[in-house]
Amino acid sequence: MSVKVQQALPLRNVTINDGFWTKLQNLVIDVVIPFQNEILEDRVPGAEKSHAIQNFRIAAGDAEGEFHGMVFQDSDVAKWLEAVAYALSVRPDPELEKKADEVIDIIGRAQQPDGYLNTYFIVKEPDRKWQNLHECHELYCAGHMIEAAVAYYEATGKDNLLNIMRKNADLICQRFGHGKTQGIPGHQEIEMALMRLYHTTGEESYKQTAQYFLDERGKTPSYFAEEIKRRGWHHWGNKEHPEYGQNHLPVREQTQAVGHAVRAVYMYAGMAAVAAETNDAGLIKACNTLWDNIVNKRMYITGGIGSTVHGEAFTVDYDLPNDTIYAETCASIAMVFFARYMLELEPKGAYADNMELQLYNGALSGMQLDGKRFFYVNPLEVVPGIAGVVPDQRHVKPTRPEWFFCACCPPNVSRLITSLGQYAWGENDKGVYSHLYLGGSANCETAGMHITCESNYPWCGDISYTINPKTAGLERFFATRIPAWCSKWALTINGNPAQYELKDGYAYISRKWEAGDIVVLSLSIEPKRIYANTRIRANAGCVALMRGPVVYCIEETDNGHDLSALRLPRESAITTTQKDIDAISGVVVLEAEGARVESCENLYSQAPPQCKPATLRAVPYFLWGNRESGGMRVWIRE
Amino acid sequence: MSVKVQQALPLRNVTINDGFWTKLQNLVIDVVIPFQNEILEDRVPGAEKSHAIQNFRIAAGDAEGEFHGMVFQDSDVAKWLEAVAYALSVRPDPELEKKADEVIDIIGRAQQPDGYLNTYFIVKEPDRKWQNLHECHELYCAGHMIEAAVAYYEATGKDNLLNIMRKNADLICQRFGHGKTQGIPGHQEIEMALMRLYHTTGEESYKQTAQYFLDERGKTPSYFAEEIKRRGWHHWGNKEHPEYGQNHLPVREQTQAVGHAVRAVYMYAGMAAVAAETNDAGLIKACNTLWDNIVNKRMYITGGIGSTVHGEAFTVDYDLPNDTIYAETCASIAMVFFARYMLELEPKGAYADNMELQLYNGALSGMQLDGKRFFYVNPLEVVPGIAGVVPDQRHVKPTRPEWFFCACCPPNVSRLITSLGQYAWGENDKGVYSHLYLGGSANCETAGMHITCESNYPWCGDISYTINPKTAGLERFFATRIPAWCSKWALTINGNPAQYELKDGYAYISRKWEAGDIVVLSLSIEPKRIYANTRIRANAGCVALMRGPVVYCIEETDNGHDLSALRLPRESAITTTQKDIDAISGVVVLEAEGARVESCENLYSQAPPQCKPATLRAVPYFLWGNRESGGMRVWIRE
């Protein structure tokens, strides 16, 4: 029994025509997706060998050769296909669709008669299938390909990949479950995927297996520990670290976000997705608790999560170093998924606020604005000569690298940006939610309303909705989010102050709607100083700047060397100017009169340091590293 | 040809009767040395097994069994014996001497007929001697035992251990050298040791071999790389990291302190010791450059060196994180050695200032004031629940552990504190230097002066010297250091202002001395605020407190939780009070009116944080962790 209070619209019902995101969607569609295809096909000179599509060809018997790449190399193809599907939803492209169909054909030929599909094991270790769920990611790869299949079906109406992956999912559901073979995924992802497949097909066993994987996790004795003992071989290591894989406690008893951040939050998203269909009070409570733990104790101001490279993991409450940080792009994307499912359970603005925070900051910073370079790690402080160099920061690259051997983040950004439409709106049979303020339109079939949105968000806070009900005088609510960061706003309807009820971060306007009704939300969107909890040691004495949902940073290219010597006094006024930076036009840049602390010559001095005036210029964090390389920091000395 | 400008006094010519150090020497002699003997003999319940003396018994054929411990386990016994020797110089103890003689007897029986002495190889891998200099530390262990032998000979006049180690050194000198077998030590130490043996015995080959090891280091092709190829087996790893072992460049071409900090600085000390006897301009220049690089770019305010646990190593200029720090106790001790040898080359106060900085801070902090617990790592910031817990700080213990499997630091502290006398004074045939202000006496035979010193340093800046020349009217200089931290001082002789020449941090009084002449140095020793170079990011916006050579810190036990929320305004007066803390009486505690920043509830807030008044209390850094456990920090927000 679904307990979703509202749900996302199918992508086909959303169009995006947005001053900010359309260009980025075009960049992904025109540059990133073709480039990623070239990468996957090993046609980019100098890039690390991917071999991901070739692995499928070999598995299909279309080519000779050896498997190459990570044990989860298949997922790169899956994420690319999923992004392609979303790209086709944004705008048709017969050539791209043909290319995708060709790849899908290969995938289909690579699949074994029983539905099994994983090129690593088909090609390299056919006798070891399903024996090493702990490390070998068969279920993770399946999950990503299932998501691609659902997306491709929804975008094109074609069931070619869907049929392949249903057969694969059926094999998984036949194998794993209560009373069947025991098992849980090493890297969670299959839970969300099976729930999407369930929504698309209505097949109960997919939902049941998703729930099984959650139920089974964290049991004693540990499935992984038993598997390791039983199998007697390993891929990377022969020891389980239960917290790393969120296998330390039954999921309903977990209260703190621990371990590998992407695995963790993919799992939490899966928990929320299952709970929305099963009304499982234990799961819902755990989701709420874990959400609170992240956003109130373990999250960077950019939305980034994962404080350490060791295990790419959460650490402990308030441990949020800016320079040795991990904050993987994929983890921010995972938070978008988690927020989306939480929002479906309970329409609280806080979830959409976080989704927005991730989109405009921790996720978007992952991609260079030429679409060809990507960050895994999204630091909040970079010092040239130290970041990427000293052992504790070797993982913190001061510029976006071209591509990675383990290439999870780039295709994940692609699929996020191309599928933005599914995060922007929500509906139920009583009305419509506007979670994000993306320009474009939403055809809300369940609510019976068609809505267009115009905005110049996030640079400007005026958002105009034109509402067309299916039938004149239809009584519905229209709820638009009022972000928690906004302390002043106005809401009008057809030019007059609107009557609304403010509840959990949404302003609900309930009325009988007529064609062409115009709702205008005016958010006061001023630069704001943000202060951190004193328990975040790295930010003590510092201030950060935000404007709307956008976190700012200071870069060396605008502010000179030695950014930790810059100070922004509390009383200094912050002014805004607009300029075009790369693909982004009208970027609001912040300026303020501050000071530069003059350094002593030696390491230490008794002489109190003096300051000289300095103009500080801050740019949106997601833009950093797009111009001259150099230092960057988000938290500025006050 | 020795180019020593002045040299340390033999320990037998120095007595220490000092308000600060005598208690600590007694602690080491009465508690630490006996306790360490119990450890070495495996008689401490709950302590990790040492087996170090038993290894010698097994090698000697006195006992059955297997070698146990690190490949350099022998050095624990060596450092203990060296500390025992110094203890016997401080005060005779027939029982302790008897115990030492028994251990020396065992060592003698363990030695092989050709002089070879290393229990790991004798007992465990007799066929692999001298094949793995890279990892297996035969030369390092020999070095420590040679130092013990020299110390024991000087303290007791007995040549039992000296003869054993001469035989061992002869074997080393016969084996290694130009035209003989090639080799360099994996962990430097033998260079300093051979120079000490040279000074004691006058045997030229010891000096030549010390120089050979330095000359050979950093050559291309790398000795270690060749050795690894040749031998085909390894102990820990089969790859050389040339910078880690300072083997990346010929030593005379090295300009930056890199790699394992203890190895590096032991080597630099050895370079200075060799240069003082050979007047090797290349070595002297390299020593000067490396010294400057450390003290001007890579040293913590406490004197600590080594910014990262990865390789226990230096990183890059200005990378001095307070919380992920290494700053090994042994590395501070190594700096004392380096400073001492540099001082002999050139009597510059900066060297003695640094020696003093290390003694009162980075080295002394290694030992709990009960003499039973020891820090390896000496952090400048500790947050409970994070230090020792999160991956990047797992090595940073918030309280001193009892003993370590790899037990280098505790016996190193013991030998340092018991041998303090050799750092306090210097002499040549024209006069005497007072480098430190330790109470006690110095019989300066070369200069022909006997000097007693009374002080209550470091708590008080008044130091009184009574000078007795060998013959009345003897014309000599008496030079007392004027520390760089001191901006105001006075110098009197027999109650009248003294005539002196200030040069390189020493005040030289040259005159004809009469028995009982009294020189009083009055250093103004006020609490001082210290500011860091702005390129040390971790200290931006912060101030540290020093008084004289003593660095202060704030501890949770005095200041409440969340120390990064405390602020010490620049204008706030700092007052002093005295109290007894453990073994240390009359500790000067600093107090100031400051403020505590009140935290927001959530992680981030738009509300500017407010402050409420708070009294800050700072205690000497070396004392931290001796009372209730909790947070600590040296750098306080201003």
Image (cartoon, coloured by chain):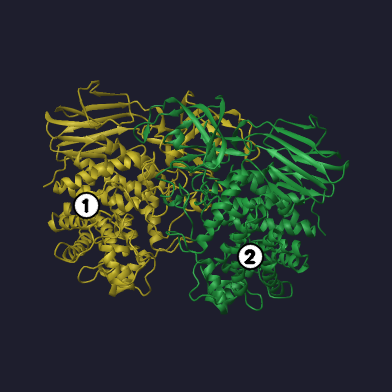
Chain colours: A yellow, B green
Indicate left or right for A631 with B263 as reference.
left
Identify residue for label 2: B145
Please name the residue that numbered disc 1 is placed on. Answer: A154
Q: Amino acid at mark 2?
A: Met
Identified by mark 1, the residue type is Glu
Above or below, comparing residue B351 to residue A241 in the picture: above
Residue at point 40%, 51% (across, down): A31
Would you say A202 lies left or right of A520 here?
left
Q: Which is nearer the eye, A268 or B499?
A: B499
Can residue B158 be seen? yes
Q: Is residue A146 left or right of residue B126?
A: left
Q: Quadrant of the N terminus of chain B?
A: bottom right
The image shows residue A36, relative to residue A378, as above or below, that is: below
x and y, in percent, of residue B449 in the image = 81, 46
Q: Position of residue A230 (x, y in %)?
A: 27, 71
Is residue A563 something that shows in the picture? no
* Secondary structure found at label 2: helix
At x 49%, y 58%, the residue is B404
| Label 1: element kind | helix
Q: Residues within 10 Å of mark 1 (few under 14, many from 20)?
A: many
In this view, which residue lies farthest toward the top? A496
Q: Which residue is more in the foreground, A631 or A564?
A: A564
Could you tell whether A185 is left or right of A303 in the image?
left
Compared with A269, B203 (above or below) is: below
Q: Which mark is residue A260?
A: none
